[in-house]
Amino acid sequence: MKLQSMTDFVLQQNKEFPKGKPLYETNWENEVENFSKLMIRYAEFIRQPLTLGMFVPIDENGELLNPPIERLQYGGGYSMRENEVEAYEKAKEKVLFEGFEFSHDNNYNTVLKYKTESSIKVELQFRKTENDVRLIINSDYIHECNDIERLTGLKTKPELTPSALKQIGL
């Protein structure tokens, strides 16, 4: 599922809401309660403040984790350090959006690029000194992007990971 606005999410879920079932086969009170809870969970999801770990794997200190690499062992053969693999996989499970990759880092910003099918260049700048996130489209600063909801306006919507879907309750 792709990230979508609250309105689009409600309309999509409404289409999937059980209709046409005989009343004696459906516990409508339970169905409406579940539908309401799902809407609230999605609203809470898109109102979360953006963090770097939603887009790329990071460690406990907020530093970017690179995928573990195979190392040449003494005497031949290759291996990976188990603790590095475990830490990376655990951090990767916390990522909520697919399609973002690390671009570059300096003293002021960590920049992620969003891979889109179009020629539009989308970047997120995580500013270290001011603790905010900026959305950059085609090298033009668009606006501060303080929560997930701001990303619903992107033309090419990011795909949600299984972790995101679990958080929403889908």
Image (cartoon, helix red, strand yellow):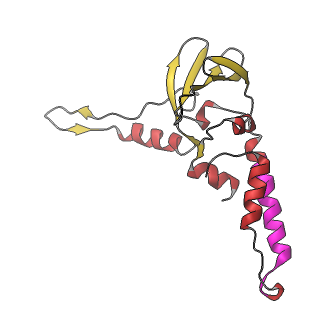
Residue 168: in magenta span: no
Give the vertical position of 29 relative to 49 (above or below): below
Question: Residue 69: percent from the left, percent from the top?
Answer: 33, 33
Please name whichever residue, 4 or 105, is drawn nearer the observer in this view of the structure. Answer: 4
From this viewpoint, which residue is outermost toward the front? Answer: 119
Question: Residue 2: percent from the left, percent from the top?
Answer: 62, 48
Left of 129 or right of it: where is 92? Answer: left
State the image quarter where residue 76 is shown. Answer: top left
From this viewpoint, which residue is outermost toward the bottom? Answer: 24
Residue 38: in magenta span: yes
Give the vertical position of 157 relative to 103 (above or below): below
* Residue plotted at (66% across, 17% down): 140
From this viewpoint, which residue is outermost toward the top? Answer: 107
Please name whichever residue, 27 or 85, is drawn nearer the observer in this view of the structure. Answer: 27
From this viewpoint, which residue is outermost toward the left? Answer: 75
Q: Can residue 95 be seen here?
A: no
* Residue plotted at (65% across, 37% down): 155
Left of 132 or right of it: where is 59? Answer: left
Left of 99 or right of it: where is 73? Answer: left
State the image quarter where residue 14 is shown. Answer: bottom right
Boundaries of the magenta span:
25-43
Name the quarter where the C terminus is drawn.
bottom right
Q: Can residue 127 be seen here?
A: yes
Q: How many marks overall?
A: 0
Question: Residue 3: percent from the left, percent from the top?
Answer: 66, 45
* Residue plotted at (69% across, 33% down): 50
Please name whichever residue, 59 or 31, is drawn nearer the observer in this view of the structure. Answer: 31
Main SS of residues in magenta: helix
